[in-house]
Image (cartoon, rainbow, N blue to C red):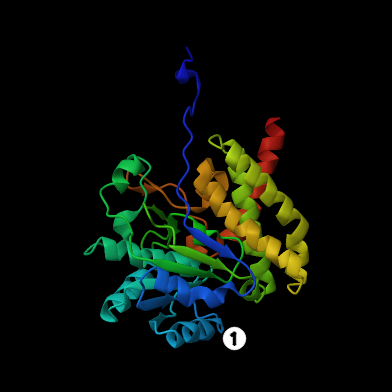
Amino acid sequence: MINKKVFQFPIMYTLPMNKIAIGWGVHETVADECKAANIKKALITTTGLKGTGIVDEINQILTSQGISTEIFDKVTSNPKDYEIMEAYKVFKEAECDGVVSVGGGSSHDCGKGVRILDANKGKHIHDFVLHKDVPWMEEAKKHKPATLPQIAVNTTAGTAAESTCAAQFTDTKRRTKPVIILPCLAPTAALIDPLLIRLMPQNITAWTGFDAFAHAFEGFLSRIHSNYTAAISLRIIKMVAENLREFTYNRMNNNACERMCWASTMGGIAIGFGAGAGIVSFCLVGTLVGGVTVTGLMPAPFDLYNASLGAVLSLAIVIIFVRRR
């Protein structure tokens, strides 16, 4: 008889996947996805994406097909706690019944925050932060799942926020960036359209693209990775290695653009298929031990991009692993 105690992780779990659609022009189906999710009035959470016309186009698609909208465009990078609380206030006052997040990880995480608050009325976004000194899966059971529908329209390729059940925000009091993990938090549907993603500035293209690599890199090295995540992670690493440089300098390269879209979303799938967020993300995301934040100190004080910091951390981690060998 096999003694399961000899295995550190004898059982591997995967999280359920919601709908993901990738393809040229798929953003035009946003109204169809809203109707399928029974959204009649949507709160659009976004940074504004000034100069691209993307938000105006999404808004026009929705309203032309009978879906009312309310736009909250005050989201900033590493969304602040007060921004999420203000977005929820707008959501309630406008009597919305769903969220359409347009942008990258910050816009999607703000939308997730609104859904968390709607499901657990009367609480502050700080009340849902993951604590390391209490089993978080038990703590999560105390909160109601985020059942409000959300359609995520990507405009960046790398964060994977469109396909994960986690959300991050900036705690402006502690000056950290904690994480929230709750059931049903992944968006109802994710729309990844290369037509929108190729509009990224060059620096954002490079940073978010490396974010996709970091998810695969840490997922492959994770001690809880499985055959699922190993296969997905290796494919992501290959796609990023072959296409990120070209896409950064030539965003009109259709093939490179499309492959980076796949790499981004597959990073979220690898996390959900058992790899979890590994050593790079742990350094960037704030968790509480005994009420004291032990990680997540790096992005918050200077409002830096996770992806750019992830590139630096990944290099340091490689050096450590090589030296240990």
Q: Is residue 283 left or right of residue 199?
A: left
Q: Nearer the viewer, residue 176 or 186?
A: 186
Q: Residues within 10 Å of mark 1 (few under 14, many from 20)?
A: few
**Residue shown at the point (37%, 66%) measured from the top left:** 149
Q: Is residue 86 left or right of residue 31?
A: left
Residue 60 picture location, percent across and down = 49, 87
Instruction: Mark yes or no: residue 177 visible.
Output: no
Instruction: Mark yes or no: residue 307 visible.
Output: yes
The image quadrant where one finds the C terminus is top right
Where residue 200 sits, quadrant-wise, is bottom right
Where residue 119 sits, quadrant-wise, is bottom left
From the viewer's perspective, is residue 132 above or below residue 173?
above
**Residue shown at the point (38%, 77%) measured from the top left:** 42
Residue 250 picture location, percent across and down = 77, 72
- Secondary structure beneath dot 1 equals loop
- The amino acid on which the numbered mark 1 sits, given as a three-letter code, is Gly
The residue wearing badge 1 is 51
